[in-house]
Image (cartoon, coloured by chain):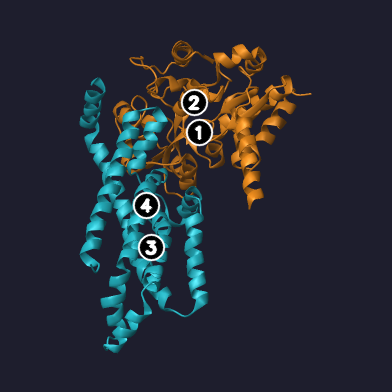
Chain colours: A orange, B cyan
């Protein structure tokens, strides 16, 4: 018994000292798969190009928690943040726009000024909200734009993620006003369960994320945002200036990723993880090898 | 001070929404525990009486297993069977509420001094009379502590109903986390806390009324 106690004590101390290792780069990701794949891509590249160790913390509830962990110094790099994040109450009196370039500029400048983060130019993919309809609705009504749903909206069962119903600028309340329609019922839920519900004919319309591979897998259709309602969510790697100053090589690695992965490619990688059940780390490594990043 | 005025304004603007989330939360959590209690209490009494060990083992193990299934997995399995919204949420929470009530009822009845039962027999009580007038009364503090613990944790777990489209205060909390609004997080948490405290208080009062002094 004593030995066991002693052993676990030593184990705990080792663990704690490992956490305090200053050569370790801490990367954080949200719960969705694209940041997780990006985290492994960054991890593999950093470990290939430098002698630094990388530790990844996955499934942090949402982007704001990643940002506050970076501010506290618990995380060095956010594997992926999206330009539209800038509208999530981080700044007072920020003018809302759906223009992608302006939004990116606001994010880069705002987060540099307030938090001293380096917000890189886009990785190349976008993971924005989009209204998508099930195959049944496509076959029955063949809508092209979101406005095409207006005559039938009171018959449609609508599902969305757990925050969209309450989002201030780009959420359901603003949507109802802009498109002048509301759905029969609107339910917030976990994104994976949302697709489960589409598959089981429990929902007709959802707010999809544009990289979700299930959109194609379930033969769903993304409708054109004809009133330009949704803000852009261009994906970027974000790092604290502190880690970049301490390790300039990390900056070089992260620069490499700018413009490297488009939405379709990312969607394909996510599919390998979420639908084919492969490990995110393996998928990331294979991708880097195929693209010639690794020897 | 500015924060307080802003928060009051938040309540004024969002009052009806907050109340509907709160109403959903009360409905889901209390109904789940209620259903859990009307199934688990009789089952617990039955298990304490039966001499069939196999049934005991099976029932305890099954309710144990429900307790350990991760919520999101349980909910995903339920969609094809029960769809989305209230039904799967209440079913899941009902399953989670079974074990503690079952265990407490069982040990409550088991804890009764056999001499008490013997003297009741001697006084000519039938077995149903014994159960109703003596055993349940004596085991009541145990049963109620099971119900109270379960109610408190089901109220906190009901925040998970938000991931399957049933709403509840989890909707406020997850929204707040999603777009960085502390008022939402605070309000959701605060109301869940108040609900848990008030329910526990009420159940405590009820317990005192019914149990032997």
A66 relative to B75, above or below: above
User: Are the residues at dot 1 and dot 2 in contact (C-beta closer than 8 Å)?
Assistant: yes
Q: Are marks 2 and 3 on the same chain?
A: no
Reading the chain from its start, which is encountered first: label 1 or label 2?
Answer: 1
Read off the residue under disc 3.
B101
Name the chain letter of the residue that bears numbered label 3. B
Q: Position of residue A180 (x, y in %)?
A: 29, 30
| Mark closer to the observer (3, 1) | 3
At a point 40% along the width and 32% down the height, the residue shown is: B177
Mark 2 secondary-structure assignment: helix
Q: Position of residue A202 (x, y in %)?
A: 42, 49
A172 relative to B24, above or below: above
At a point 42% along the width and 59% down the height, the residue shown is: B95
Q: CA distance from mark 2 to mark 3?
A: 40 Å
Reading the chain from its start, which is encountered first: label 3 or label 4?
Answer: 3
Q: Position of residue B96 (x, y in %)?
A: 42, 57
Kindly identify which numbered label has been placed on residue B154: 4
Task: Give neighbour class at mark 4: few <14, some 14-19, many 20+ (Cα, 10 Å).
Answer: many
Quadrant into which the C terminus of chain A falls = top right
Q: Are marks 2 and 4 on the same chain?
A: no
User: Are the residues at dot 4 and dot 1 in contact (C-beta closer than 8 Å)?
Assistant: no
At a point 26% along the width and 37% down the height, the residue shown is: B17
Name the chain letter of the residue that bears numbered label 2. A
User: Are the residues at dot 3 and dot 4 in contact (C-beta closer than 8 Å)?
Assistant: no
User: Are the residues at dot 2 and dot 3 in contact (C-beta closer than 8 Å)?
Assistant: no
């Amino acid at each position: 018994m004593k030995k066991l106690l002693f052993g676990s004590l030593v184990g705990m101390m080792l663990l704690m000292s490992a956490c305090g290792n200053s050569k370790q780069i801490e990367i954080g990701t949200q719960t969705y798969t694209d940041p997780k794949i990006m985290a492994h891509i960054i991890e593999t590249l950093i470990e290939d190009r430098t002698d630094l160790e990388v530790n990844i913390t996955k499934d942090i509830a949402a982007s704001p928690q990643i940002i506050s962990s970076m501010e506290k110094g618990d995380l060095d790099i956010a594997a992926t943040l999206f330009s539209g994040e800038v509208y999530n109450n981080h700044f007072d009196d920020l003018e809302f726009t759906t223009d992608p370039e302006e939004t990116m500029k606001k994010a880069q400048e705002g987060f540099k000024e307030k938090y001293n983060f380096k917000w890189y130019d886009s990785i190349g993919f976008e993971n924005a909200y989009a209204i998508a309809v099930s195959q049944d609705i496509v076959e029955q009504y063949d809508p092209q734009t979101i406005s095409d749903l207006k005559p039938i909206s009171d018959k449609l069962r609508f599902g969305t993620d757990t925050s969209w119903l309450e989002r201030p600028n780009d959420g359901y309340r603003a949507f109802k006003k802009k498109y002048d329609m509301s759905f029969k019922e609107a339910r917030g839920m976990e994104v994976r369960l949302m697709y489960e519900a589409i598959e089981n004919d429990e929902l007709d319309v959802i707010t999809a994320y544009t990289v979700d591979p299930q959109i194609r897998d379930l033969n769903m259709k993304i409708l054109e945002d004809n009133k330009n309602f949704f803000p852009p969510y261009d994906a970027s790697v974000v790092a604290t200036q502190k880690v970049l100053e301490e390790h300039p090589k990390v900056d070089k690695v992260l620069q490499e990723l700018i413009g490297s992965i488009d939405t379709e490619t990312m969607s394909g990688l996510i599919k390998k993880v979420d639908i084919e059940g492969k490990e995110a780390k393996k998928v990331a490594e294979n991708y880097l090898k195929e693209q010639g990043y690794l020897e | 001070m500015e924060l307080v005025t802003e928060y009051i304004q938040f309540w004024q603007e969002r009052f009806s929404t907050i109340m509907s989330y709160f109403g959903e939360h009360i409905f889901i959590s209390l109904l789940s525990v209620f259903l859990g209690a009307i199934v688990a209490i009789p089952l617990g009494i039955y298990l304490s009486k039966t001499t069939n060990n196999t049934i005991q083992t099976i029932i305890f193990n099954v309710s144990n297993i429900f307790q350990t299934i991760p919520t999101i997995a349980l909910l995903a399995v339920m969609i094809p069977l029960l769809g989305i919204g209230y039904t799967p949420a209440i079913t899941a929470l009902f399953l989670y509420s079974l074990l503690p009530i079952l265990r407490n009822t069982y040990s409550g009845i088991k804890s009764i001094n056999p001499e008490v039962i013997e003297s009741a027999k001697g006084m000519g009580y039938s077995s149903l009379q014994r159960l109703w007038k003596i055993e349940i009364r004596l085991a009541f503090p145990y049963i109620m502590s099971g119900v109270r613990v379960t109610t408190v944790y089901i109220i906190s777990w009901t925040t998970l109903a938000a991931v399957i489209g049933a709403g509840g205060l989890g909707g406020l909390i997850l929204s707040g986390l999603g777009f960085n609004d502390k008022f939402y997080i605070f309000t959701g948490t605060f109301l869940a806390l108040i609900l848990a405290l008030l329910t526990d208080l009420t159940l405590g009062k009820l317990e005192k009324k019914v149990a032997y002094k």
